[in-house]
Amino acid sequence: PPLDGEASAPEEGEGKVITLFRCTMRSSQKWWFLSEADADQPGTDKDIDYYQHKSKTAEEMNLPPSDGWVTCGSRNDGGPGRDPPPHLQPRGSMVPPGQEGMALTAQISTWAVQNNVVELVLGGMGGGGTHREIVSRSISLIEFMAKLGRRWEEEDEERHLSVEDEQGSDMEVDRLSPSTMSRSEAIGRETLSTSHLSLAWETYISNPDESVTNEVRRLLVTVLPKLTDQLAIHLLQLVACSLDRNEKAQNLNEIVELCSALAVEYPVIHPADGTVGKKEQQPQQKEPSRALSDAVRSQFLLLLWSVLNHPDASSSSSQLRPEIENLKEYVRNELRYHPKNRMNFLDGCRSALERNAASTAPIDAPVDEKITLRTVNLTRFVLQACPSAEAEEVVAGGREPLASLLFRELAAYLKRQKAAAKANDGPRAKSDLLRKSSSISTTGASVHSSKPSSSAGVASQHASALADRLDFLRY
């Protein structure tokens, strides 16, 4: 950071003190210097400059750059700096252990928590509403709080600070609060917490203003990789739980839009082979800080699987259907790197196939054939994501070979169709038709003209379902 206060000259026999600071030049440009700061007038031409860097971007103006340094020469008669210039690597905040809570960053975050800033932004105080501009202008603050909490957690994991208590046993040092409070509790009280994320999610799915919803979605997408893994997983679990609410269709729309935004912002990238996915022709150059951790990616994959299994996913609107197809492609690519999830998903599909194969219920206890067909297609979908050797093992293994199970499921489906056709042709179907006809105030021609169209639609759905099942068996 910029030099603050006077620099003290090293005592005789000690090494030189090299100071990193930023200087605003007469041209208003921001330059960084590595120098021996003058003890009386630091930051002036009395400093002995070793290396310098002229900032060209906003990021370089705010943070010391790693590369691009130039050896100083003309100002200091050749200068003490030597080529090649250094490469700088950040090592974390230079705050004495135990005093992190006194840093300006900690004080800002603490102030925001104690004054309920996040609640005010998201309209959670006193039941009031919010405005899209308030949310938009607060994203950087909430992102800052998320990054601070993650940084503190990472630093704690590295330090493993401990002290000896009076009995000689190890006692964890809490840098933010009294020793009676755990470190995780202290971090939660000074930065973002689960309650903040719960409020953000409730605002996203319940606010009637679409412009506010869009800004909250942008907030969630922005902060997700900055959160600690525990908080990020909590947020994704909140999203998954919303799929089980009564307002299924509305929640599904909001959830698919959020998942699509996350999939675009954080594509499937793995160090082993760069970027995968048909739509990604060139490796994406994502900053490390923006990448999702393995644990968060795994939880995101579980969320996407829940979306694909949702009862309304098969009958989604034409506007939502392309987004769901894109999410399927994302899951297909991601499953290549999550063998445990592949097996769990396939086990779930097998269980559903077994239930469907055992169901030959009459029309009085109908089965949703859209869901049964979706189960068949999802089974094939996951199987295609498996490596060849693993796929062969899946097909031949288990309580029953997969081909045999698919044959039983197909036979059960045909029996259900036969029972449904027989019921529709019986006396009950005729009485239903008479009752419906008497309740429709229109001409007979218009009533009968709708029946062939409906029958044609049912026949088309049956043909498509049968073709998908037979095609899977051939596969």
Image (cartoon, rainbow, N blue to C red):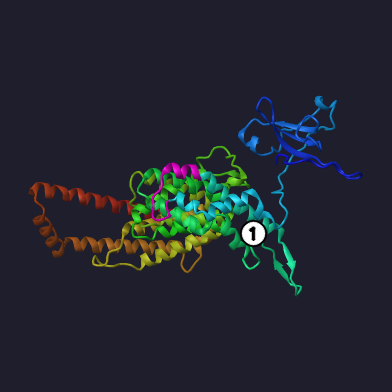
Percent position (x, y) of residue 55? 67, 31
Dot 1: what SS? loop
Left or right, 459 with respect to 91, comes to: left
| Range shown magenta | 123-138
Q: Residue at x 50, y 45 (%)?
A: 138
Quadrant showing the N terminus:
top right
Q: Nearer the viewer, residue 456 or 129?
A: 129
Q: Nearer the viewer, residue 403 or 234?
A: 234
Percent position (x, y) of residue 212? 40, 45
Q: Badge 1 local density, few (<14 within 10 Å), some, or many (20+)?
A: many
Q: Residue at x 67, y 54 (%)?
A: 100
Q: Residue at x 81, y 24 (%)?
A: 74
Left or right, 24 with respect to 347, comes to: right
Left or right, 475 with respect to 81, comes to: left
Q: Nearer the viewer, residue 178 or 418?
A: 178
Q: Residue at x 33, y 44 (%)?
A: 318
Residue to which mark 1 is pinned: 176
Percent position (x, y) of residue 349? 44, 61
